[in-house]
Amino acid sequence: MAFLALASAVLSALLALAVFRVPAWACLLCFTTYSERFRLCQMFVGMQSPKLKKCEEAFTAAFQGLSDAEINYDERSHLHDAFTQMTHGLQELAAAQGSFEVAFPDAAEKMKTVITQLKEAQACIPPCGLQEFARRFLCKGCYSRVCDLPLDCPVQDVTVTRGDQAMFSCIVNFKLPKEEITYSWKFARGGLRTQDLSYFRDVPRAEGYLARIRPAQLTHRGTFSCEIKQDQRPLARLYFFLNVTGPPPRAETELQASFREVLRWAPRDAELIEPWRPSLGELLARPEALTPSNLFLLAALGALASVCATLLVWMFFEWYCSGS
């Protein structure tokens, strides 16, 4: 008996592969099971009817138009619910002695309408990054995929005069998840322009998407890298090649330069990039600097200024009235 049960299961599987062969890997197969589809046909034509195979083939043929459908990955649950409702509707038609030759094409057309009304996936934005908001679900194979773009973004050139400030913005042109986003900075010294991670060393003090060096010196010439992660998963790596131009100070001799090199003239990696604490002018000039904490700080300063102004007006009014 066990052997017969195993043989029956194998034959059912082979039958499913024969009837629902590629390119029939449509949305129908992703969101319904073979047993559900077979049971529907049994309800339409009978448990042991010779029309069972014809019913199954008609079911597959009706949904061939959905074999290449692609949907927003986040819309999978909505589409699954729509197929569940479709299955219940077909069961009701079968119970009412309806015809599968009419019911299946009609159900397929309704599902096409449902798919067109789903929220579309965002387009991939080149040139780089793991863009989760553009992830798509492919019915032809029942799998998802993201944009075929590299993690490494092209190197950006930043040129500053020696002694000035160098600013780096680790910002991508695609939408990032809202939670668990971290930024880590690395530096490849020696004037290297590279994306080879083996040349980079961590810059521990640097954190956040904005970083700066001041004053920029010739020893800072090289490539800086910022890696964006979500829960330890890399989303993008940005590179900035810093070119520091300009001669050394006029009064500095070669001996003085060597002496200053010994006296920590060249900054250590841990002191290479300082955390960016923007001034009020920088906050107003750079919209990306208006983080929630900075906005709260500005609101607090505004409220304090308003209270002080009100107090001064009240004191002046009291003084004026007492003089009168």
Image: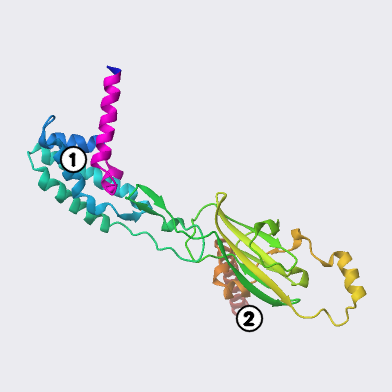
Closest to the camera, between mark 1 and mark 2, is 1
Q: Which residues are magenta?
A: 3-32
* Residue 319 within the magenta-colored segment of the rendering: no
Residue projecting furthest to the right: 255
Classify residue 219 by image quadrant.
bottom right
- Give the residue type at disc 2: Gly
Residue 22 in the figure: left or right of residue 226: left
The mark found on residue 312 in the picture is none
User: Is residue 252 visible to the viewer in this orientation of the structure?
Assistant: yes
Foreground residue among 304 and 244: 244
Q: Nearer the viewer, residue 186 or 320?
A: 186
Secondary structure at numbered mark 2: helix
Residue 26 highlighted magenta (yes or no): yes
Q: Which residue does the numbered mark 2 point to in the structure image? A: 323
Question: Magenta part mainly helix, strand or loop?
Answer: helix
Where residue 229 sits in the image (x, y, percent)? 56, 54
Residue at point 13%, 29% (across, down): 48
Whether 87 is drawn above or below 316: the answer is: above
Name the residue beneath numbered marker 1.
56
- Which SS class for mark 1? helix
Residue 276 visible in the displayed image:
no
Q: Residue 22: x and y, percent?
A: 29, 47
